[in-house]
Image (cartoon, helix red, strand yellow):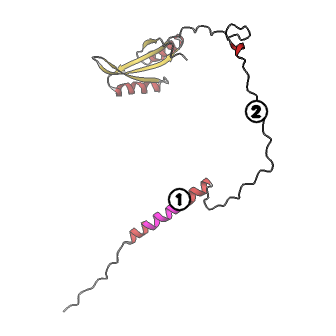
Amino acid sequence: MAKPVSRPAKRGGSSIFAGVLIGLTVGAVLTVGVALWVTDNNPFKIDPPPAAPAAPEPAATPEPAPSFDFYKVLPGDESTALPAAAPPAAPPTPRYYLQAGAFQNADDADNLKAQLALLGVEAAIQTSEIPDKGVFHRVRIGPFLAMDQVNSTRSLLAQNNIPATLVREEPNPQETP
């Protein structure tokens, strides 16, 4: 009879697994070492104790607190005149916008904004809900404070076949800086 061929018994584990494990360990140690070297943060470095101050600095004398005399602060005393009231604020100037389009689809508004950006015009998209019509995305350019800026931008848009509508906005007095 033929002798059965015996194969050597496999040992547990794999050489690939051991190589990956050793590689990860070496990589982690190198990473920590480089991070400590770059940040100059050595946890094993012993700092010398701080030196004691040679001589205490002379204490600065605090400024004396202002003294108020109650009778000098009373109203009707000419010596304590109140500051003049600020002049009334001028009416707020209107802000102008050029509206290049209003779309129900946000992608269409983004496309127009990108087209305006290629012309060098900065635009913003305002999203608002209009009753009985749905959500609209407005593409607006501005704000402009002077009409000459509005006219020059409008002419640039007209040269590129982009219609624009002038929108005038009156700011609330609370919004004025």
Residue drawn at (46%, 19%), measured in percent from left and top? 141
What amino acid does circle 1 point to?
Answer: Thr
| First reached walking from the N terminus: tag 2 or tag 1 | 1
Q: Quadrant of residue 60?
A: top right
**Element assignment for label 1:** helix
From the viewer's perspective, is 32 left or right of 19?
Answer: right
The x and y percentages for residue 138 are 38, 20
Q: Rate crowding at label 1 as few (under 14), some (14 to 19) or many (20 or more) other CA atoms within 10 Å.
A: few
Q: Which residue is mark 1?
A: 31
Looking at the rendered image, the disc whose residue lies closer to the viewer, 2 or 1, is 2
Most common SS among magenta residues? helix
Which portion, as a residue range, is magenta? 21-29
Q: Residue 31: where, in percent of width, then height?
A: 53, 59
Task: Point out the image quarter for the N terminus.
Answer: bottom left
- Is 89 on the left-hand or right-hand side of 122? right
Is-magenta flag for residue 10?
A: no
Residue 161 visible in the displayed image: no
Q: Is residue 24 magenta?
A: yes
Which is nearer the eye, 118 or 107? 107
Residue placed most toward the observer, 176 or 161: 176
Where is residue 22? Give x, y as percent: 46, 68
Quadrant containing the C terminus in the rendered view:
top right
C-alpha gap between disc 2 and disc 1: 53 Å
Residue position marked by numbered label 2 in the rendering: 62
> Badge 2 local density, few (<14 within 10 Å), some, or many (20+)?
few
Dot 2 and dot 1 residues touching (CB under 8 Å) = no
